[in-house]
Image (cartoon, helix red, strand yellow):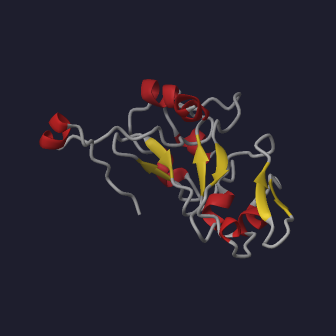
């Protein structure tokens, strides 16, 4: 469920302007800069994705929704795009998974769904006394595929963009 965020500054509140959304994850091999510069918003990548995780965002550009499924890195989106948006010479994703405070294991409930779903074994579980094992993410092993996001029953796993992390640090 996506909520609309209102800028509560006086002028923007009275005019109904919304806060700008943080940059959403883009399809594999596409960076925000290349999407902004070259994407025409034709949407050819949307039906090409066999996983059904690509949709056009509020700006008419492709963005990923990992709540449905994960990326299989098939490249169908890149092949369907008529513009120079995709560069398969670069790593597929810049983002990595982040496990939030709503994680069942962190709340004392036994769950290992994210680790079971991770094809790269980037999420492992560390034993602790007096509670269930806790997830630990090896960011160097995370491919950004989103399998853990789709599998998490608590919706505690998200993806984080490195540029956003640096801006909030």
Left or right of 121 in this view: 48: left
Q: Which of the 4 image quadrants contains residue 128? A: bottom right
Pick whichever, 138 or 141, lies toward us: 138
Residue 44 % position (x, y): 46, 45
Q: Is residue 114 left or right of residue 124?
A: left
The quarter of the picture where the C terminus appears is top right
- Residue 154 in the image, given as x and y percentages of width and height: 58, 69
- Residue that protrudes farthest toward the left in the picture: 14
Q: How many marks?
A: 0
Q: Is residue 101 left or right of residue 24?
A: right
Q: Is residue 168 above or below residue 13?
A: above
Residue located at (63% from left, 66% from top)? 152
Q: Residue at coordinates 71% horizontally, 63% vertically from top-left?
A: 114
Vertical relation: 129 (above or below) 62: below
Closer-to-camera residue (37/49) = 37
Left of 33 or right of it: where is 72? right
Where residue 68 appears, as percent x and y from the top left, is 55, 63
| Residue pictured at 51% horizontal, 38% vertical | 81
Question: Which residue does the image show at 25% across and 43% down from the upper left?
Answer: 8
38 or 102: nearer the eye?
102
Q: Quadrant of the N terminus?
A: bottom left
Q: Nearer the viewer, residue 140 or 119?
A: 140
């Amino acid at each position: 469920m996506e909520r609309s965020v209102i800028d509560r500054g006086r002028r923007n509140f009275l005019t109904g302007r919304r806060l700008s959304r943080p940059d959403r994850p883009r399809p594999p091999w596409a960076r925000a800069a290349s999407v902004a510069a070259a994407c025409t918003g034709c949407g050819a990548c949307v039906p090409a994705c066999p996983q059904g995780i690509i949709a056009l965002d509020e700006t008419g550009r492709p963005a990923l929704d990992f709540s449905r499924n994960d990326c299989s890195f098939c490249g169908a989106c890149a092949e369907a795009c008529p513009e120079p948006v995709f560069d398969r010479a670069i790593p597929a994703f810049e983002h990595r998974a982040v496990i939030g405070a709503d994680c069942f294991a962190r709340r004392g409930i036994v769950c290992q769904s994210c680790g079971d779903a991770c094809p790269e074994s980037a999420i492992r579980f560390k034993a602790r006394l007096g509670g269930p094992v806790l997830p630990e993410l090896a960011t160097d092993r995370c491919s950004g595929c989103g399998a853990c996001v789709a599998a998490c029953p608590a919706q505690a796993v998200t993806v984080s963009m490195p540029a956003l992390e640096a801006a909030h640090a």
